Structure formats: structure tokens, C-alpha cells
Image (cartoon, rainbow, N blue to C red):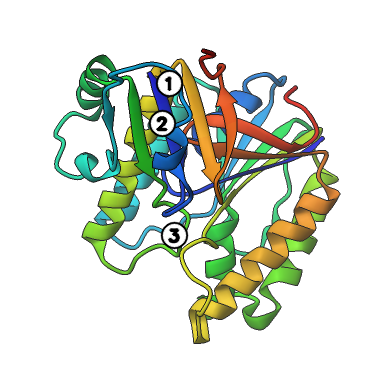
Amino acid sequence: MIFITGPLYSGKRTFTQTLPGHNLKMRADVQNLAADAADLPALADRLAHEYDILIATEVGGGVVPMDANERADREAAGRLACLLAARADCVVQMFCGIPTVLKGELPTC
Amino acid sequence: MLTLVLGGAASGKSEYAESLVLKTALPRYYLATMQVWDAECAARVEKHRKMRAAKQFKTVECPLHLDAVRLPARGTALLEDLGNLAANELYDPTGAGENAAAAILRGLDLLAAQCENLIVVSNEVFSGGADYAGDTGRYLRALAQVNNAFAARADNVVRVVCGVPVYYKGVEP
């Protein structure tokens, strides 16, 4: 599984079009699944098993929110990202359209 | 050796910083900065205490006045984190107020002189917008001033992204 993270509108989905392979199963915005998950490691296992590409928008890089629920959601999203990165063969961080491989190697054609 | 470990919320920065400490010899000091206000703080402290259990850390509470810390012996100190410390120094009535950044940097210097390894955890809170007024703006400026000045004098600067360490300066020991 390839895990792609990065800020909002940093080119995460566009980048997946450059990846080799057909019929790759992809899921974006996985950060939104974290808040309601009772068991984050189980969710990470399921996602990693089910998809070839997972995309999460980084949401933990701003000022700590005033609202307790927002803080908890942000925490869960970050934790899920750590769990997915640990399970990924390759982790890519996007920054204004530029990919940086943080873990493993990108698949070649 | 001075190391700055940075990361966003739930980025895995604490676990990574602790893994660095575990590569060093005893004694190990954990300099805790959080003032416990409510159940959420208490839960966070408890989570971090659990992570440190069995790792032979001696906890030193220092939510304010870093310059007053005297470590009993030379070893490794893990300070967590600058985000709390900056908020405490800025807003606590007994804190340094507008001199928060300078006070923290002086404290870090004094601390560095007392240990073989100083590992400092700090927070990336600068990517959620660019127009902060008043107290929030003051806080962001103070924290950035401490982050950047400590990064300049640190041997290692590492940013933790979803649990993966990325070195911007130095190499992983």
C-alpha cells in the first residue's frame, strides 16, 4: 500500500495519476474516517488490506482548536496517519505538487 | 548533542523523541511542561506517562522557569514540549510574559550545559492560516522564535511526519 499525505490542495490525487498499475484501489480523505472509529489500529488494518493507495490530508499543523471535539478529531486523524504509514510499503508527502518519498520506494513501471 | 524534534498534532513526535532517548545512557530525565487543568490534560499526561513507563525516566516538572532546573547528574534530558512552555511563560501570571521567548532560550542554554544530550520536542502549529491577531499571534511569534533559534544551535533537527522521522539537519544517531 502507498500512503500519500500532505496539506490541503498539495497535489495528492494528481500525483496518483503518475503511479504505474491498473485498477489500483484508491481511497482519499481517510483522515475523515478517524473521528468515528472505535478502534484505530483495526481501521488501519482494514484500509491497508483493502486499498492500494490511501490519501490523508494533514490536519495537525495548525493552531490547536478551541473546540474539544475538533481537538479530539485532529488527534485521531494524526494517529490514523501514523498507523497507516507504519503499514505502508511507501509513504509520500506532497508539498505544492512535489512528492517526497519518506519511506520505501515508489513502484516503477 | 542538541536535538530538536518537531511535528504536528499526533504526528508521532513523542514516541520518536523517546526512541532517541532510549539510545542514550542513564540517567534519563523527562522535563514535563504541561499544567494540568482538566480531564483532557490529565488523560494526555497519563498517556505520556504510560509511554515512559519502564523506560527509566525521572520526571522533573517544569511548566515554568526552565532556568531554575538543576539536574542532579549529567545524562539525557527530554523536554516536552516548547508549545506548552511558551504558552505557560506567556500567559501564566508568574511567567515571563512578553519576554517568554528569551526566557525559554536562556533556560535551554542552561539546561544544555547540564546534560550530555538534550532532546527538545516542539510543535508545528504554523500551517493552519496566516492571519492571527492578539494573543494567538503573540504565541505563534514567540514559539517560532524559540523553534528557529534552538534549531540554529541544534546538532539535529528532525520533523516527524506520520511517525516517519525526516532530518532537516544532522543525521539519525
Viewer-nearest residue: A73 or A50: A50
Quarter of the image that includes the N terminus of chain A: top left
Residue beneath label 1, please?
A86
The residue indicated by pointer 3 is: B35
Q: CA distance from mark 2 to mark 3?
A: 26 Å
Expressed as whole percent of the image width and height from the top left, the position of residue A12 reads 43, 41
- Chain letter of the residue beneath label 1 in the structure image: A
Q: Is residue B108 left or right of residue B163?
A: right
x, y percent for residue A75: 33, 46
Q: Is residue A46 left or right of residue A31?
A: left
Instruction: Please state which amino acid type lies under the numbered disc 1.
Output: Ala
Image-quadrant location for residue A102: top right
Residue B94 in sight from this viewpoint: no
For disc 3, the chain is B
Instruction: Residue under label 2, please give it.
Output: A82
| Amino acid type at image mark 3 | Gln
Residue B143 locus on image (x, y percent):
63, 65
Examine the rendering and report whether any part of residue A105 can be seen: yes
Position of B34 with respect to B44 (left or right) is right
Q: Residue at x 58, y 70 (%)?
A: B140
**What amino acid type is highlighted by mark number 2?**
Cys
Q: Is residue A39 above or below residue A89?
A: below
Badge 1 marks a residue whose secondary structure is helix
Q: Position of residue A7 (x, y in %)?
A: 46, 51
Local secondary structure at mark 2: helix
Q: CA separation, marks 3 and 1?
A: 32 Å
Q: Are marks 1 and 2 in contact (CB under 8 Å)?
A: yes
